[in-house]
Image: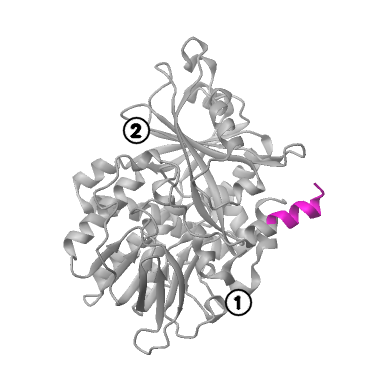
Amino acid sequence: MASNDLLSTIVGRMQADPGLPHPQPTPAFWQSPPHHLSDARSENLPERAATVVIGSGITACSLVKALLERDPNAEVLLVEGRGLTSGATGRNGGHLVSSAVADFSTLQQHFGTSMAVKIASFTLANVERVFEVARECGAEVEGAAEIRRVDKVLALRDVAKAESLKKSLESFEQHMPEKWKGQLRLVEKSSLEEKYRLRNIAGGAVGKSGALWPYRLITRVWSLLQEKYPKQLRIETWTPVTSVSSAHEDEYPYLVTTSRGAVKAKEVVYCTNGHTGHLIPALRGKLFPFRGTMTVQNCGPAFPNEGDSRAFSFYGSGSFSSDTKAFDLGLHYMQQNARTGDVFIGGETEDVDGILNSDDSQISPRSLKTLETILPVEFASDVWKDGEGPKVESSWSGIMGFTADGVPLVGQLPKIATGREEGGEWIAAGFNGYGMANCWLSGEAVAGMMRGEDVTEWLPACYLATPERLRSIDAQKGAFRLFVR
């Protein structure tokens, strides 16, 4: 395929209608057993609702929690197309980490140093906020979520990545506020090989990070909110929203149409991530789905169980195969269950159709094949008993939301996006694979903006869904950023 043909294919996939979440997704390990609110819904939908929130992942949870706690008059109707928290939050890798250090130079290049500092500070504060929320919810929630602080080991597969990280770390340490410095330290190749039993690396680093069981945390927060605000929060699962339109009514200007009927709303919030383009066609290509692949693997008794103290990311420069048309995106991420020793590892090696895809009822075959064989490539032979490799016990896919310029889309939606002038539509989506480092504070930011609070001091301005930003980004920009580097 010629480069122009490839670019055209990528752009076409980014601009496609992502559709609704598939009703029969691949079973995700995190979601077994399902929470008791998984299928919560009433017999009939209300005719009207003050605030309709679409989606039930970590972003929606944060936003609804903030609204209910800050606004005594808040009334929220939560509508979810499938089971509660069954989307990306219940399907990710279980990492609680900011990419601020590794990405700092890139952020400087695209947004300038002051904005890079603000983005990095926001994501680092978001990680701390998630720990704080879990702690506030009590020991039972903390224990169930298995939330813990760990070292993140960055294993760099090539010299170019090692040099890039060194440069980014130096700039991060030079420009960041004192409170955030010291997030990461470079480690010699030989030390990484000896201490962590790694191989096929050019260098690396060790940094601050966290790990958790995201589905358990968020579903338990939903349960606490339902108990505390039974008259103000209504959860309706298996209620996919098929459209949002004008209701032509002053007090309730929006008509939210679902598979179970329509609801008139005063305000609507889209926490719909990779599926947003189905409801807001003008955002297609600016915000698009990206399918991820995850596995759980049994690595045997010789493999060290250090899930309570460390996680890994394996970085390379990435590649494209002209034979298979598949992209290796150069990243695999791994954590370990501290109780069972099970290894959770994910990453993508697939063609454009398999990556820019919103169907999580299927798993990318090339990605899965790579994940089945990647661990013996990364870890020394002495961690495998009698030469046996790991065995995949579970695999699934999940749909992330990516933006053309690489930062989330947060705030009030302008007419250029919705075609409507009422101004009561809001969004928090497009977290580019780092939802756990962005979602919670993004949800709190939108809740604050909805109630007239000034969040400009801590929310990066480049996250805002302004008309100027939306005019400046498109699928071609996203294609070059992600694939045609």
Q: Amino acid at mark 1?
A: Glu
Q: Which residues are magenta?
A: 1-10
Residue 423 is left or right of residue 354, and the answer is left
Name the foreground residue: 283 vs 180: 283
Q: Residues within 10 Å of mark 2 (few under 14, many from 20)?
A: many
Name the foreground residue: 21 vs 432: 21
Q: Residues within 10 Å of mark 1 (few under 14, many from 20)?
A: few
Quadrant of residue 240 within the rendered picture:
bottom left
Q: Verify whether residue 4 appears in magenta.
A: yes
The outermost residue toward the top is 386
Could you tell me residue 6's position as x and y percent?
75, 51
> In terms of secondary structure, where does tag 2 sit?
loop
Q: Residue at x 59, y 65 (%)?
A: 284
In the rendered image, the vertical position of residue 75 relative to residue 331, given as above or below: below
Q: Pointers 2 and 1 in contact (CB under 8 A)? A: no
Q: Where is mark 1, residue-wise?
A: 468
Residue 155 is left or right of residue 250, and the answer is right
Which circle marks residue 154 in the picture? Answer: none
Q: Earlier in the sequence, mark 2 or mark 1?
A: 2
Tally of marks: 2
Could you tell me residue 281's position as x and y percent?
57, 70
Could you tell me residue 51's position as x and y percent?
33, 74
> In terms of secondary structure, where does tag 1 sit?
helix
Q: Is residue 424 visible?
A: yes
Name the foreground residue: 325 vs 440: 325
In the rendered image, the vertical position of residue 221 relative to residue 307, given as above or below: below
In the rendered image, the vertical position of residue 307 relative to residue 383, given as above or below: below
Could you tell me residue 415's position as x and y percent?
53, 81
In the rendered image, the vertical position of residue 254 relative to residue 65, given as above or below: below
Q: Where is mark 2, residue-wise?
A: 308
Q: Amino acid at mark 2?
A: Asp
Q: CA distance from mark 2 to mark 1?
A: 45 Å
